[in-house]
Image (tube, rainbow, N blue to C red):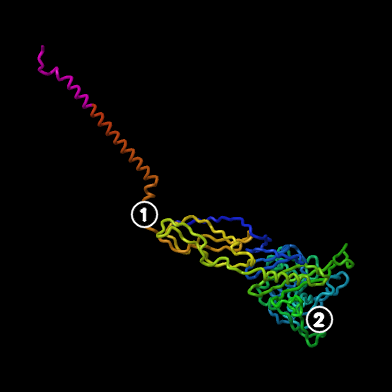
Amino acid sequence: MKKAKIFTIFFTFILLFSAIGTNLTAFAVFSPTFDLYSEGVYMVNLDTNIVVASKNPDKKLYPASTTKIMTCLVALENVKNFDAKVECDYVCFDEFWATGDDYNPNFYGASNAAIETQQNNVTYMDCLYALMLRSGCEAANILAYNISGSLSKFVDLMNETAEKIGCKNTHFSNAHGLFDENNYTTAYDLYLITRYAIDNYPGFMKICGTYEYDMPKNEANPDGYTIQSTNRMMAPESAYYDEAVKGIKTGSMNEYILKKDGVWDEENPKDGFCSLVTSCEKDGYKYLLVTLQAPWLDKNGDEGCTHFEDHQKLYEWAYSEFERKEIIGKNQQVSEVSVEMGKDTDKVGIVTTEDFYTLIPKSLDSTAIQQIVPTTEPFVAPVKKGEAVGNLVLKLNGETLTTIPLVTEADVELDKTAKYKDRIKTVLTSGGVIASFVILGVTIVAFAISKAITKTIRANSEEMQRRRKLQVAPRNGNAKRK
């Protein structure tokens, strides 16, 4: 059987709205119609892996305490027994009140979970909850020290993990996220880190999605104490509360200080900022949202809430604007291909092997998604059902959403009569046969001409002989002389 050759034709298709390109696989990006405080934004629908909002996704920005997402991830990858006790060594606290050459004003007033130096009843699990709920900077250092033996070695492990995940514009310089010019990431890279943690460690979301956690007792809290998440979107009494939002990590600083001529310029602090990573699941849809470096003050002068405002608006927009639709069904016919010498038919249907759903704006008709069907040469019967016929390419805003393998819809038997007719036609129209007929024709014509010439010559010869006889006859006869 002759196999069909597939030639795919690609088209440029312009839709109703523009898209922002990303470096993820098969995504279409849509821009919200409102302004955002955050300098970097990356929002993904986890059901379809479609990016619905993106702003400066690859710009290097300061993550603040969202750095602790990586700290948590490295801990989850390296701790074997989370119920084991940790050592709360002084080295885990020293940098928060260091003096002299080690003095760093950005590390003073660090958020903490009230863990005390030399406390001996704290577990790895306690530290993880203290890290992710209360944003405990001492918890970050305790984890780093106990896992790697030193804070610097743990930071090396953080950077190695970031590289393994695929981060291209990220570098960590500490485990807690307090300001340092060499501690930076991007909205896209932080998405990769968070997504990796969610996909590979179920315990990650269990921790991040918890609002309250009971910590072990210590000298300052002899009966133990309860810590709560710093994420106001999880706090029932907050104006930003959304019961569908779970975790993941806040990050903020009211100001930060840079060095000038090698000296900390504490008289000219820089304006602070807020960062936030959350997930949200409701109405059958799940999103992951990363925002970085929203200003510390909002337009009304309120402090430390701009990141919550951005997340609140983006979730309201996404849940009202988008819906998941079936774009094409399994076994749906997308075209027909001609079949030569087919019995009772001269065509065979081409169908999809799977269905495809995607997220699109409710106002956008699913027909706006471009379907690129491969152009196929005719088949020659017999054709088997399920024979591969290339791929259907679905595109939106010029980006490929998916490719779906196509196959033949049914068997097509060979028409034997047509086959024999085709063979006879082939034989009769082949070069050798035509040449033979030409030679035969020429031979017949030549023979006929030769025969005609021979006949003519013979007739002429006979005529000449007859005339000669007539001329000779009187001389030999008995005619009388006068």
Residue type, mark 1 in image: Tyr
Does 4 appear above or below 434?
below
Q: In the rendered image, which quarter contains the N terminus?
A: bottom left
Which residue position is annotated with label 1?
420
Q: Nearer the viewer, mark 1 or mark 2?
A: 1
Q: Residues within 10 Å of mark 2 (few under 14, many from 20)?
A: some
Magenta segment includes 132 = no
Q: In the rendered image, which quarter contains the C terminus?
A: top left
Front residue of this view, candidates 190 and 401: 401
Q: Which residues are magenta?
A: 461-482
SS at mark 1?
A: helix
What residue occupies the far top of the structure in this picture? 482
Counting from the top left corner in percent of width and height, residue 33 is at 71, 64
Front residue of this view, candidates 442 and 85: 442
Residue type, mark 2 in image: Glu
- Residue at 72% across / 74% down in the picture? 248
Can you see residue 151? no
Magenta: main secondary structure: helix
SS at mark 2?
A: loop
What residue occupies the far front of the structure in this picture? 363
Front residue of this view, candidates 127 and 269: 269
Which residue position is annotated with label 2?
116
Q: Which numbered marker is on residue 178?
A: none
Q: Residues within 10 Å of mark 1 (few under 14, many from 20)?
A: few
Counting from the top left corner in percent of width and height, residue 218 is at 80, 85
Looking at the image, residue 224 sits to the left or right of residue 434; the answer is: right
Q: How many labels were placed on the picture?
A: 2
Does 21 appear above or below 93?
above
Earlier-in-chain disc, 1 versus 2: 2
